[in-house]
Image (cartoon, rainbow, N blue to C red):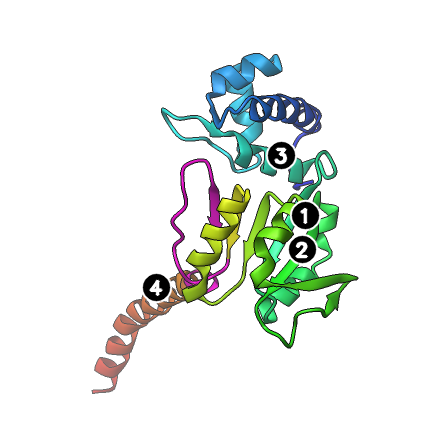
C-alpha cells in the first residue's frame, strides 16, 4: 500500500476495482468520474479525492482509462488481481526486471521471458526458461499475458510492439529509448531513464546557476574592498 492513503479510502479501492473489472468485461475503455462514482455508490468528489491519492486525476472531457486505472488500483490492493507479464529483451535491464521480486507482491506474475540471442535461449531465471523471439506470438498465447515489458534496443522495439499487440497484448511498459506507435485501446507507459537523468541534471544546473548568481555580488564586493 502507498503511504499516506486513509483507511477509509483503502476500504473503497476494492469496490472501485470491482466496478472497473465489470466495465472492462463489457468492453468499456474509458469512464467518467460521475459514472464510476455512481456505480461504486459514492459521490464524484469523494471518488476524485480517493483516486488522487494514487496520482490518478483522469483527463478532462474524457475521464479515466479503465485498464490503466485497474492496474493502478490492483497494484495498491496487492493480490486483488494477478496480472501475467511478459518481458521481451533479457539483457542487463531485462534480467534485472526478471529478478525483481517486487512484481509478485504487487499482483504481477512474470510468465514469459523472450530474447533473440542464441546464447540466452533456454537459460532459466527463477525456473522460467528464456524463449526465442521467433516464438513471441506462441509465448503470448500460451501464457495469456496482457502486459508486456519491452527492454530491447530502440531499433527493435516498434516491431516487437506490433507483434505483441497483434498477439493480444493490450498494455506495454516500454524501456526502449523510442516512442512506440500503437492502435487505440492499447496502453503504453514509457520509462526513459536517460530522460529522467536529464531532468535531474536540469535541476542541478539551475541550483548551480543560482548559487553562482548569489555569490557573484559578494565576490565583486570582496574584490572592490581589496582594491
CA distance separating discs 4 and 2: 43 Å
Measured from the top left, where is residue 92 in percent x and y? 60, 71
| Nearest to viewer (mark 4 / mark 2) | 2
Question: Which residue bears the numbered disc 3?
Answer: 73
CA distance separating discs 3 and 2: 24 Å
Q: Quadrant of residue 202?
A: bottom left
Q: Secondary structure at mark 1?
A: helix
Question: Which residue bears the numbered disc 4?
Answer: 206
Q: Marks 4 and 2: CB-CB under 8 Å?
A: no
The stretch in magenta equals: 175-195
Q: Is residue 159 above or below residue 12?
A: below
Mark 4 crowd level (few <14, some 14–19, many ≥20, 10 Å Cα): few
Residue drawn at the location 50% of the way across and 15% of the way down:
35
Q: Marks 1 and 2: CB-CB under 8 Å?
A: yes
Question: Which residue bears the numbered disc 1?
Answer: 142
Say which mark, if any, is on residue 112. Answer: 2
Amino acid at each position: 500500500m502507498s503511504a499516506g492513503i486513509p483507511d477509509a479510502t483503502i476500504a473503497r479501492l476494492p469496490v472501485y476495482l470491482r466496478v472497473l473489472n465489470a466495465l472492462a468485461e463489457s468492453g468499456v475503455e474509458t469512464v467518467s468520474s460521475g459514472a464510476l462514482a455512481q456505480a461504486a455508490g459514492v459521490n464524484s468528489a469523494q471518488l476524485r479525492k480517493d483516486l488522487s491519492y494514487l496520482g490518478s486525476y483522469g483527463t478532462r472531457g474524457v475521464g479515466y482509462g479503465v485498464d490503466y486505472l485497474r492496474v493502478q488500483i490492483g497494484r495498491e490492493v496487492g493480490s486483488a488481481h494477478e496480472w501475467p507479464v511478459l518481458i521481451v529483451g533479457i539483457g542487463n535491464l531485462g534480467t534485472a526486471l526478471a529478478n525483481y521480486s517486487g512484481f509478485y507482491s504487487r499482483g504481477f506474475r512474470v510468465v514469459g521471458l523472450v530474447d533473440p540471442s542464441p546464447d540466452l535461449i533456454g537459460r532459466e531465471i527463477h525456473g522460467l526458461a528464456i524463449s526465442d523471439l521467433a516464438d513471441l506470438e506462441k509465448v503470448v498465447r500460451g501464457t495469456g499475458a496482457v502486459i508486456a515489458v519491452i527492454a530491447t534496443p530502440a531499433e527493435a522495439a516498434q516491431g516487437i510492439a506490433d507483434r505483441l499487440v497483434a498477439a493480444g497484448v493490450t498494455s506495454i511498459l516500454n524501456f526502449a529509448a523510442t516512442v512506440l506507435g500503437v492502435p487505440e485501446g492499447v496502453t503504453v507507459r514509457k520509462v526513459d531513464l536517460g530522460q529522467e537523468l536529464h531532468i535531474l541534471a536540469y535541476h542541478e544546473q539551475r541550483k548551480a546557476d543560482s548559487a553562482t548568481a548569489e555569490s557573484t555580488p559578494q565576490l565583486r564586493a570582496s574584490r572592490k574592498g581589496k582594491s
